[in-house]
Structure formats: structure tokens, C-alpha cells
Image (cartoon, helix red, strand yellow):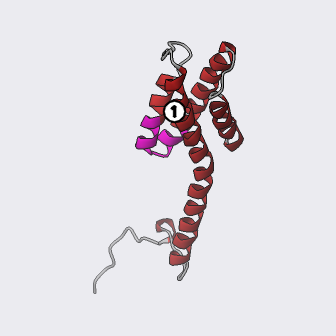
């Protein structure tokens, strides 16, 4: 996923220059697919704030019902911010995974001090003991 998101970011940065209209149609499709992937990954990890940011990006770059701003000066900051966000997601994902791995190793080290027993390992006598 990291190479694809990096490609989306580079394509957004290239969209700053004057290019044929076909490139911008390609950019809309590419950014929409990238935004859908990012939205899915954020929703599955329950990070709703970032998913709303990429929903806005998906609406702006929507190829089915395109939003035309008609001025290149309006698209330049949008393309730049979108490219930066794709780079942040691509490279911050690796940091989040490392953080989760560190937390996981800390959890296992806390509980590894004694023998581990499970409820299925306990012997339960269904009858009450007789009192003499």
C-alpha cells in the first residue's frame, strides 16, 4: 500500500503543472481509488477523524460527479495538501505498526511472570463435598 500511496502523492504534486486534461481525469480516478483504500483502512482501525478528511478528498476528486473549480490557482493548494496527506499516511502507517508491536511485546512481558492457566484447565467438581 505504501508504494501506491506514494505514487498518488507524486501524481498530485505533478498535477500542479500545466498538463493535458486527460492527466487530470487520470488523477481524479487515481486519487479516488487511493482515498477509498485509505478510508477503508482508517475505518477498520476506528480512526474516524482521518477517514472524514479522506472522505472530503474523495468528494473533491470524484471522477463520477466531478467538481470543477475552473481556476488552476484553486487546484494548486488542493493538489499540494492532498499529496502531503497521502505521504503522511504512507509513512506514518509504518510508525503506527512499530508502536503496536512495542505495545504488544510490553503486554506479553507483563503477564509472562507466572504460569498461565485457563478456565478450561481447572477441574470443577459438580457435586458438593459431603460433610461428616
Assess whether residue 47 is covered by the magenta stretch: yes
Seen from the viewer's position, the closer of residues 77 and 98 is 77
Q: Quadrant of residue 30?
A: top right
Q: Which residue is mark 1?
A: 77
Measured as percent of width and height from the top left, residue 36 is found at: 55, 30
Q: Residue at x 67, y 40 (%)?
A: 6
Asked which secondary structure carries label 1, the reply is helix
- What is the tally of numbered marks visible in this picture? 1
Other-residue count near label 1 (Cα within 10 Å), few / some / many at <14 / 14–19 / ≥20: few
Position of residue 89 relative to residue 67, above or below, is: below
Measured as percent of width and height from the top left, residue 122 is found at: 47, 72
Quadrant (top left, top right, bottom left, bottom right) of the C terminus = bottom left
Residue at far bottom of view = 132
Position of residue 101 relative to residue 78, above or below, is: below
State whether the magenta stretch is mostly helix, strand or loop. Answer: helix
Position of residue 128 relative to residue 120, above or below, is: below
Q: Which residues are magenta?
A: 41-53
Seen from the viewer's position, the closer of residues 10 and 44 is 10
Residue 79 relative to residue 26: left or right:
left
Measured as percent of width and height from the top left, residue 12 is found at: 62, 31
Amino acid at each position: 500500500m505504501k508504494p501506491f500511496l506514494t505514487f498518488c502523492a507524486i501524481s498530485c504534486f505533478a498535477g500542479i503543472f500545466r498538463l493535458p486534461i486527460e492527466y487530470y481525469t487520470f488523477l481524479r480516478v487515481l486519487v479516488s481509488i487511493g482515498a477509498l483504500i485509505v478510508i477503508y483502512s482508517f475505518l477498520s482501525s476506528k480512526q474516524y477523524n482521518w477517514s472524514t478528511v479522506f472522505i472530503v478528498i474523495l468528494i473533491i476528486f470524484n471522477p463520477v460527479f466531478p467538481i470543477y473549480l475552473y481556476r488552476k490557482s484553486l487546484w494548486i493548494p488542493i493538489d499540494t495538501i492532498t499529496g502531503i496527506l497521502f505521504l503522511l499516511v504512507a509513512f506514518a502507517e509504518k510508525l503506527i505498526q512499530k508502536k503496536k508491536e512495542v505495545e504488544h511485546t510490553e503486554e506479553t512481558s507483563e503477564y509472562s511472570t507466572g504460569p498461565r492457566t485457563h478456565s478450561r484447565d481447572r477441574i470443577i467438581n459438580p457435586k458438593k463435598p459431603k460433610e461428616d
